[in-house]
Amino acid sequence: MNEILTRAATAEAVSDAPGSLITLLADTAPLTCNTATFEEGATGAPAHFHTKATEFFLVTEGRLDVLVGEHIRTLAAGDFLAVPPGVTHAFAPSPGHSASVFVGFTPGMDRFEYYRLLGRVSAGEAPVQDIKDSSEKYDNHYAESAVWSGRRRSAEP
């Protein structure tokens, strides 16, 4: 494998929801990486799972709540978490906080097109159904989580 170099000045950034920005870093067969920046109150990612890849998180600033199965972990700057395939997870900034996170997948998952799709849906340029229809292609399967739903409701004013 050749080196992968992405310069900050030329990295593509995608706004996938209000208060959320994903910066695309690497999308190869062995590894997909991005950074995600969430403003306070951003919704983050809903409950979902991947069948083929481990997703990992390194919080670089702020605080991030992450659902892992039936438990919510609160991560602070410097904390690392890896979620294996098949485990339902979700993430968002902790109530009252913003968060910046390095996110990766191994093996790589061709995620850049998925993030671009999220951006088009957020901008009103594509229907939400396109996300639902892409679950197999991008190995992103949405799930229900009473634990996560309860966390989000309890965080509302």
Image (tube, helix red, strand yellow):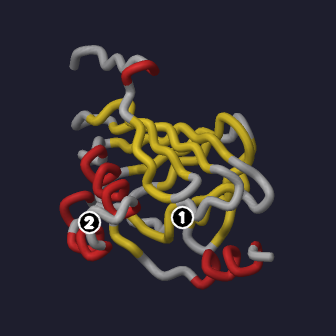
Q: Is residue 14 above or below residue 130?
A: above
Percent position (x, y) of residue 54? 41, 50
Q: Badge 1 is on which residue?
A: 90
Q: What element does badge 2 sit on?
A: loop
* Foreground: disc 2 or disc 1: 2
Is residue 88 left or right of 126 when viewed as pictured?
A: right
Q: What label does residue 126 carry, if any?
A: 2
Frontmost residue, 102 versus 127 = 127
Frontmost residue, 36 versus 57 = 36
Percent position (x, y) of residue 138? 25, 58
Residue at 40 percent of width and 62 percent of height: 122
Q: Amino acid at mark 1?
A: Ala
Q: Quadrant of the N terminus?
A: top left
Q: How many marks?
A: 2
Residue at 54 percent of width and 64 percent of height: 90
Is residue 45 left or right of 120 when viewed as pictured?
A: right
Is residue 65 left or right of 81 when viewed as pictured?
A: right
Q: What label does residue 76 carry, if any?
A: none
